[in-house]
Amino acid sequence: MPRIKFGAFLAPHHPIGEHPMLQFRRDLDFVEQLDALGYDEFWCGEHHSSGWEMIASPEMFLAAAGERTKRIKLGTGVISLPYHHPFNVAQRMVQLDYMTGGRAIFGSGPGALASDAHTLGIDPMTQRDRQDEAIAIIRRLFNGERVTAKSDWFTMNDAALQMRPLQEDMPFVVASQISPSGMTLAGKYGIGIISLGSMSTQGLMALPTQWGFAEDAAKKHGQTVSRANWRVLLSWHVAETREQARREAGPGLMRWHNEYNVGTLQRPGLTAFASPDDAVDKTAFVEGAASVIGTPDDLVTMIRNLMEASGGVGVVIGFAHDWANPENTRRSWDMVARYVVPEINGYIDGLRKSQTFVIENRAIFERAGQAVMAKIMENEKAAAALSVTGPGRVAIPAVNAPDLQKAKR
């Protein structure tokens, strides 16, 4: 089975109250940690309202992250294309690609917050069509074309980029949630997708249904889509035990849901959680949950279920949040890298097989102990000492030592 990549998605969703300067620095520390732990991708978004999401320019944040990291890919998750002139987006992404040494991923969306669109005077009914229009233009610019285009929201006259991306083919990724538009765009252009969280097995949000939208659009436009370029967002907080994970994440999860989703965004159909335990139960322990609050083993099970339900994805993206305090959050991501990633990708399968082989074939290796005993018996003083030898107390037991207590009898 192809190995799965892992990454993190920072919207961000930070409770109001902490100094924004220190929050930005802590977020950059987080990217640095992910890079050191071997994660493959990091994503951050663009928002202009709500108080909880204060990264207005993902490109600016990722340029700073690029200076702190060495290998992790850095994705805009996402640039809201209707908010920007397409030529400016293309230029900024090219600059980001050079500044990060060819590690940029261009993620785009129509814009998630209605309050952002209202601020900019944009009709929400136009946003998805404008994203489509902008992607087509930006792809032409990346290919080195000189573009003249006039739209109801931008004009370009003989526009060409002074520099093309450092990467020969910078990855394009579109966000998808409920409507078919994101998946359809991915199919239309043969580009990647990041699905923002569902483990539903039926209906509109079912992953197979969503993937079908992409395949149908690809067939219609003579393109192909690859599951290797399909990213699915999950939420998690892991600890040594389920009880510990529940204790660490419950209060912050409750605050995030009650203050942000219910109190600020007033998302339809949501009601406030009554307690931290209620928050955990209704987030991580209901049918179709896309969240894990538990142990690394619980997350391994979730990811394997995801692969079965979806038919296969290329990248698992964890939603970065402040459900737990900073120390426990860092430890959670550390545990995922140490225990979940290698379990999913089979990095320790060979070690287990080697251990089992040694256990099951112990009789084959008895000759090594016999060789040690032969040398003892060849030495007169050693043979005499053997008769009075007691149980050994050594720092590291000799690998091939014979049973000296048995031998002296």
Image (cartoon, grey):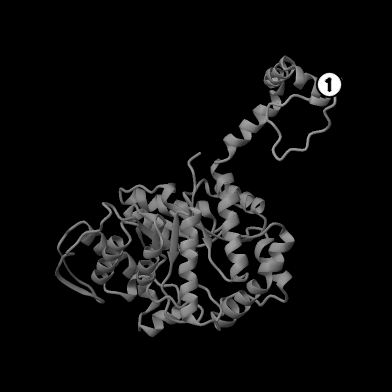
Q: In the shown orientation, is residue 157 left or right of residue 55?
A: left
Vertical placement of residue 174 versus 387, above or below? below
- SS category of the residue bearing label 1: loop
Query: Which is nearer the eye, 50 or 177?
Result: 50
Look at label 1 and name its amino acid: Lys
Query: Which is nearer the eye, 296 or 218?
Result: 296
Measured as percent of width and height from the top left, residue 154 is found at 23, 75
Q: In the shown orientation, is residue 51 left or right of residue 143?
A: right
Give the residue number, with chain letter if any, for mark 1: 408
Measured as percent of width and height from the top left, residue 400 is found at 68, 26
Residue 390 occupies quadrant: top right
Vertical placement of residue 221 versus 2, above or below? below
Query: Which is nearer the eye, 230 or 71?
Result: 71
Q: Mark yes or no: residue 236 visible.
A: no
Q: In the shown orientation, is residue 358 left or right of residue 100?
A: right
Measured as percent of width and height from the top left, residue 23 is found at 50, 76
Which quarter of the figure is the C terminus placed in? top right
